[in-house]
Amino acid sequence: MRIASTQYHTTMNTSLQMASFKVEQLMQQMATGERLLVPSDDPIASVRLGRLAREQAALDQYRDNIGALGGRLRHSEVLLDSMSRDMLQMRDLQIWAADGTNTSEDVRAMATQLISLRDSIFATANTRDQEGRYLFSGTASNTASITLDPAAAPGARYSFTGNTDLQQVVVGNGITQAANVPLDEMAAFLNQLDLTIQDFQTPGVTVNDPAVRARLKATTDLLDTTFNSVSSRIARIGGALTTLDSQDTSLANVSLSNDHAVLALGKLDYAEAAVHLTGYTTALQATQKAYAKVSALSLFNVL
C-alpha cells in the first residue's frame, strides 16, 4: 500500500506534537507537584476537589469562630470568677456585721469595704472587649450592662440597661453556641446592697435595730441567690468550653481527612510521573530519529 508524502508528514507531525505535549505536561506537573493542571485533565476529580475546597473553607471558618468564641468565653469566665470572689468577701462582711457586738464605728468601716467591693462588681459588669463592646449586655453590646444614676435614691440607682438575648455563633454545620452571658440580676442586687451600705453609714447605727437587721438579712439572702446565679454561669461557660474543644477536635479530624483526599486526588505521584516521562521522552526521540531517516529516503535510493 502506498502512503502519500503529505499524509505521512501530517501523521508524523501529529504524533510528534502529541508526544511533545505529553512531555511538556509531565514536566509542568512535576514542577508544580499538581496532577491536575486544568479541570479537563480529570473532570470527576476536579469536581471532587472543588467540593473539598468549599468544605475546607467552611471548616476553617468554623474553627476560627471557635477560637474567637473560646477566647471571649474564657475572658468572661475570669471576670465572673472575680465577681464571685468579691461577693464572697461581701458575704463575710455581712455575716460579721450581723454580730450584734460590733460598734457603729466597726459597721461604718465595713461600709467602706462594701462600697469598694460594690464598685468593683459594677465595673466588672460593665467590662468591654477590645472592640469596645460590653460583654454582659446581651445583644445590646453597645449599651452598658448596668447604668448608675447618682441622683436617684439608694435602692433605685442601678438599672439593667442591656438585654438577655444571646449572641449565637456558628461553630459547625447547624451547630451554634452562645457567645455572651447577660447579668440582668446584678442591678437588683446592687440596689439592695446600697440600702445596707446606707444603714451602715448612718451615725450611731446598731445592727440590733430590727429594720437594719431585716435589710441586712434581705441583702445577704439576695447576695446568696445572685452568687449562685453567677456560679451557674461560670459552670455553663466551663461546659461550653469543653464542648468547643471537642467540636474543634472533630473539625480538625475532618480537615485532616480532607487534606488526605486532596493529596490523593490532586497531588502528583512523582515516581509514576518519572516513569511516564522517560517513556514519552524515549518515544519522542525515537520518532524524531525515524522521521528524519524516512524523510531523507527517496525512490532513487533503491534504483
Image (spheres, rainbow, N blue to C red):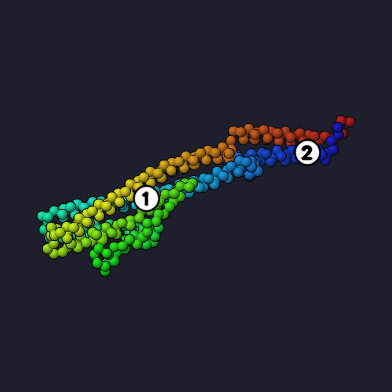
Mark 2: give few (<14), some (14-19) or many (20+) Cα within 10 Å. few
Q: Quadrant of residue 143?
A: bottom left
Residue type at the position of mark 2:
Thr
Report which residue position mark 2 lands on: 11
Residue at image x 65%, y 34%? 276
> Which numbered tag is attached to residue 117?
none
Asked whether, in this view, residue 255 is left or right of residue 11, the answer is left
Report which residue position mark 1 lands on: 73
| SS category of the residue bearing label 2 | helix
Residue at image x 26%, y 69%? 151
Q: Quick check: marks 2 and 1 in contact, CB under 8 Å?
A: no
Mark 1: give few (<14), some (14-19) or many (20+) Cα within 10 Å. many
| Mark in the foreground, 2 or 1 | 1
Residue at image x 23%, y 59%? 193
Foreground pick, 2 / 119: 119
Asked whether, in this view, residue 229 is left or right of residue 28, the answer is left
Q: Where is residue 291? Give x, y as percent.
A: 77, 36
Residue at image x 18%, y 52%? 95
Question: Can residue 31 be seen in this snapshot?
Answer: no
Foreground pick, 131 / 161: 161
Asked whether, in this view, residue 140 is left or right of residue 44, the answer is left
